[in-house]
Amino acid sequence: MKLPLSVRKVCFTAVTASLFIASCSDETTVFENPEDNLVSETDQSKLDNSVSFERAGVLDIFEDPIASAKRSSLTGKDEEEAGDYPLSLVAQIEPPTFTNGENLAATHVALDGDYGYVSYNTVGQDYVGAIDVIDISDPTSPKVTSRVYYTNADLNSIAYDNGYVYVAGGVDAEQSVTATANSLVAKIAVSGGRMNTSSITYGFQEGFNATDVRIIDNKVVVTSGQDGFVVIYDKNDLSVLNESAFSDLRSVAYNGNEIAVLDAAQGVNFLDQNLNITRSIAIDSDFGIDAKRTLDFLNENIVVSEGTKGAGVYNATSGSFVEYLPILTSPENAEPGEIVTNGVAVNENVLLMANGAGGLSLSETNENTTLGVGVIELTGSINYIATKGDYVFAASGKSGFQIIKLNRPSESLAERCSELQSYSGSANLNVNSGDDFAYRGSKRFNNMNIGGNLLLCGSWTVQDGVNLNTDGLFEMNGTLVIGRNNRQRNVSINSGATLRVEGNLTIYGDLNLNEGSTIEFIGDDSVVNIFGKVNRGANTTVEGSFRDVRGSF
């Protein structure tokens, strides 16, 4: 645990341009342009090598036993059913490493436009952190464009606004030439995906560690835990506009009208623009010591990460309890204290919970109920999640930054498929010679074995291989992902058989075009991404136009 320091405010005035400028309030000090324990990564190859596709590919979901039992009772079948949510892991960004900084863990994610911003800290007594800027304009091929190391600061939360990154964290004030308290906020200019460390503005406030940062209009709101404050800064220069003391703040949220803060000693407090408490929700959960916990508004409710209890949902106006969203399942070897809900995110009807060592769980929501689906097959301790469009971005502790694709069928594709029957059946899809099947939907399969005719319209993943037997026809319209990069599986097309593709085909393995087989690409927008090889026998045919991501053909 990082112990508090008895450090009080120290004020400086501008003397020369080579010295820093400071402004003071009763509790907070701001500095301009200090080069304090800060290192920029200049080796582009090191940034490039941070992107890993080792575990990329089809993701299984360890299903919640209750939800699974309900589904089995509805179908009346004992065999394994094809699962919903055909997810895939696109890539991982490994945590930064440097001398005396070999134990960094991803803590928070901010998304804006074509970029993702990731903060890192170090568990334990050391104050070491980092910031990554990641180009996600093409999420299937992310690039780390900028990285900064802090050799004397943990970074726990990050936000982006209008050309600047804002980070909140903790610093060892006794070892710093500028810090006047343990909790810090930094404002760093960023342009074209690159941070400019020659112009950084810092603010320091009381509290053991700054825990969260939120941009609200022209203000920066920062919370600090254990005898800390919620502080409102002017976004332009980080001068202090207002501040209020609390026991142990972990997070701040804003719904367009009012601010809410999570105090681990008491619960949720709603604040007006002057930081006066307007009402409270008392919560007696154990929020842990120095542990990341978040809260956020969701329609008329507010969702609170409550550690081992999961996530608590409360009516934001009345404060009345609505429901608990429990942690669905637990990894066998996880420490009990580490299986805690750290954060929650919502993407349409999907609710995602970052449960630390308990992983990333997925639930379905509608107006009246929330049904747990299961835990997504990811590595690492999931500390925070953000979601945008068809993607989920997870800050995963020592497993770094992970990009997950939901693989939802587009609305236009769903319209074209609407007349087809929705697939509901075995996870092992067999189409015998003489069969003629056509389905729509989005499912997870174990394997496919096709001897007749099959049309699939939608989004589909296959853990194991796809085998297209002699004279078989497989037409896919949408998205199909097969295998994983660390457990490659092949697609084999045999004599006289045809695979017809309109959409996106990703194979973590080989494409085997055996003698007399055909693969056709329909339209002008098809994409094929093969992580293995294309093996072609005699008299094979490749037809149509397509984008070959890895030049496999």
Image (cartoon, grey):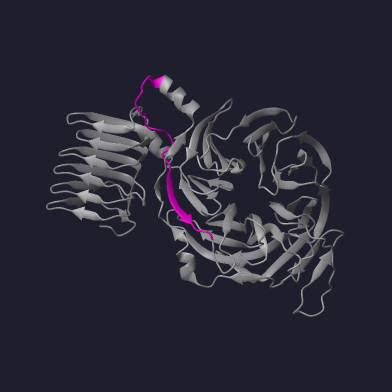
Q: Residue at x 73, y 53 (%)?
A: 222
Q: Could you say where residue 451 lies in the image, as x and y percent from the top left?
A: 19, 35
List the single residue furthest toward the right: 26
The magenta-colored residue range is 74-95
Q: Could you say where residue 90 lies in the image, as x and y percent from the top left?
A: 43, 51
Q: Could you say where residue 498 lies in the image, as x and y percent from the top left?
A: 20, 42
Q: Is residue 259 above or below residue 150?
A: above
Q: Could you say where residue 415 lies in the image, as x and y percent from the top left?
A: 39, 34
Q: Residue at x 36, y 39 (%)?
A: 460
Q: Is residue 18 above or below residue 27?
A: below
Q: Residue at x 70, y 62 (%)?
A: 186
Q: Is residue 245 above or below residue 298?
A: below
**Residue 281 occupies quadrant:** top right
Toward the viewer: 230 or 103? 103
From the image, which quarter does the N terminus lie in? bottom right
From the image, which quarter does the C terminus lie in? bottom left
Toward the viewer: 250 or 17? 250
